[in-house]
Image (spheres, coloured by chain):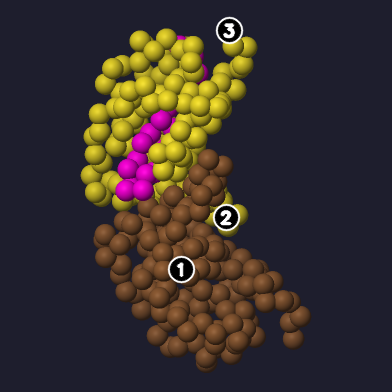
Chain colours: A yellow, B brown
Amino acid sequence: MSTASRPEITAEVTEGVCRLLYHHEMACLTELRLGNGRRLDVLALGPKGELWAVEVKSSVEDFRVDQKWQSYLDYCDRFFFAVPMHFPKDLIPEDVGLIVADRFEAAIIRASAEKKLSAARRKKLLISFGQTAAGRVNKFSSKENVLG
Amino acid sequence: MSTASRPEITAEVTEGVCRLLYHHEMACLTELRLGNGRRLDVLALGPKGELWAVEVKSSVEDFRVDQKWQSYLDYCDRFFFAVPMHFPKDLIPEDVGLIVADRFEAAIIRASAEKKLSAARRKKLLISFGQTAAGRVNKFSSKENVLG
């Protein structure tokens, strides 16, 4: 049984997810503040402008208290939950993607159906993704953008 | 007369430019590798997806050896040269933008005409801007993208 704390598990799963998506040629931003007031754990941008959102659930309780995860669907073409190895996978709805991860590796267990963003929405998200990312690089753009 | 070296002047002007553009709500990436093989000093992304390219010229010699700056025009809606205070401004062609900067402040002396990127080109650049910026934040995306 893992003795890691919830933030530690979340950090480890997030790291595994980013590593995995990097091998899919996607660049990740973590802990994004969204226009709807929520935070998203990972948003990944692919070479054709694909946007995949990943929400990390460190435990069953963490998953159960999140009643509003559907609101993430407005920010991506595909949505995944990412959970640690010991998480009971049957809890995750079958129509969303599922990634199992620890710090060192991760695997896409199930891809979500793709629900493509509109061109206008994608452009808006590409702009805020770029501004937010550049803002984390450059000290003169340190204001965190709200995405989308 | 300044005793700063050419790289020092370039760094100082770049810093002033990023500070200035930040106040225009633009997020900057510096030292980008472009698809045409050249490097660009600053590319700034605005809230509506505007892309402004800025090439820093630390000295007259630095400006004179650059015979191919027109190739930057494929990467932006507006193009600017940025120069230090003591640079003879009359050397800069009148149809491009001009920023004068030091480390602490900068001013747009002349805006360039706007030549809007096509929608497809802009989308491609927004994607590589976002991937490159996120790659500089996230250790799992550390491969530098070539822009556009």
Vertical comparison of A104 with A91: above or below:
below
The x, y position of residue A76, in whole percent, is 32, 37
Task: Label 2: state its secondary structure.
Answer: loop
Q: Nearer the viewer, mark 1 or mark 2?
A: 1
Which chain is indicated by disc 2? A
What's the magenta region?
A: A39-60
Vertical comparison of B75 with A134: above or below:
below
Quarter-of-image position of residue B50 = bottom left
Q: Nearer the viewer, mark 2 or mark 3?
A: 3
The magenta stretch spans residue A42: yes
Q: Determine if marks 1 and 2 fall on one subunit.
A: no
The magenta stretch spans residue B52: no
Q: Nearer the viewer, mark 1 or mark 3?
A: 1
Instruction: Report the amino acid beneath label 3.
Output: Met
Instruction: Report the amino acid beneath label 1.
Output: Gly
Residue pointed to by mark 2:
A138
Which chain is indicated by disc 3? A
Residue pointed to by mark 3:
A1
Instruction: Report the amino acid beneath label 2.
Output: Asn
Which chain is indicated by disc 1? B
Q: Residue at x 50, y 87 (%)?
A: B92
- Cα separation, mark 2 vs mark 3, equals 41 Å
The x, y position of residue A56, in whole percent, is 46, 25
Residue sitting farthest toward the bottom = B90
For the residue pair A84 and B27, the one nearer the viewer reads as: A84
Residue sitting farthest toward the top = A1
Task: Label 3: state its secondary structure.
Answer: loop
Of the 4 image quadrants, the one containing the N terminus of chain B is: bottom right
Q: Determine if marks 2 and 3 fall on one subunit.
A: yes
Q: Which mark is residue B37?
A: 1
